[in-house]
Image (cartoon, rainbow, N blue to C red):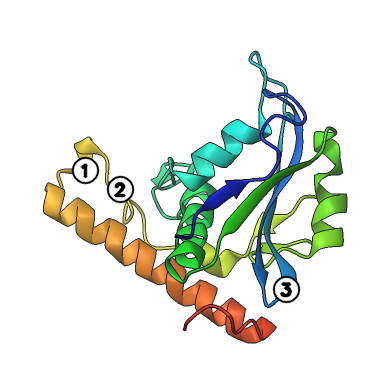
Amino acid sequence: MTQIIFDNVNEPAQPRNGVYKWYFLCNGKEFCLYIGNAGARNSYTQKSTLLRAMSEACRSTFTTDSINGIKYTKLDTDFILGTCIQFIIENGIDCHWKHIDDDPYKEIHHARLNNPLIQDTRGATPKIYKKMNIEKPNRYWDITKSSGLTDKQINQKRQEAILAVYEEFKKILKEKGISCLEM
């Protein structure tokens, strides 16, 4: 049975600021999926790389953005990354998480070093590739209770989003020549 493997949950002890990575092994080679950080922004509470991992693995946030009244137009990183993790696992490969550095400001260094599949590392901070955001018109991805959608419609939107992320991820895998995941 394939699963998420947390390589070093208690080394260092959590909660812990720092940098973490998601990766999988394919034909003996490691492929980095995503590099993230916890603690680079000021916060009242202690940030945790493991808590970020749990949020991403559970796809806890579906959409993100609310700029100048435009809302629910893009999928959130948690949802995108969690959906890619789900795709990997559904295709028979374990997906790993690992805390790799205690300094959250070293995220871009580790991103450039690991070349994550779903991130652009050319800027000051790594960003999810724009094509992975599955951008739609204002309020398209609104599945909140106030959206007026029925449970069936909400499930249809979630399924549409999952399939859209799967398709973009498959394109990336094909571009990179990663053939161990069924297409």
**159 lies left or right of 51:** left
Q: Which residue is drawn at 21% across and 55% down?
A: 155
Mark 1 touches mark 2? (CB < 8 Å): yes
Q: Provide residue 77's location: percent of width, then percent of height.
A: 54, 50
Q: Is 79 positioned to the left or the right of 175 in the image?
A: left
Graded by Cα atoms within 10 Å as few (under 14), some (14 to 19) or many (20 or more), the crowding at tag 1 reads: few
Instruction: Say above or below: 168 vs 90.
Output: below
Q: What residue type is labelled 1?
A: Ser
Residue position marked by numbered label 1 in the rendering: 147
Quarter in which the N terminus is drawn:
bottom left
Residue 158, image quadrant = bottom left
- Dot 1: what SS? helix
Question: Along the polypeptide, which appears first: circle 3 or circle 1?
Answer: 3
Residue 141 is situated, as x and y percent measured from the top left of the image, at 33, 54
Residue 126, how many percent across, how many down?
74, 54
Are discs 3 and 1 less than 8 Å apart at CB? no
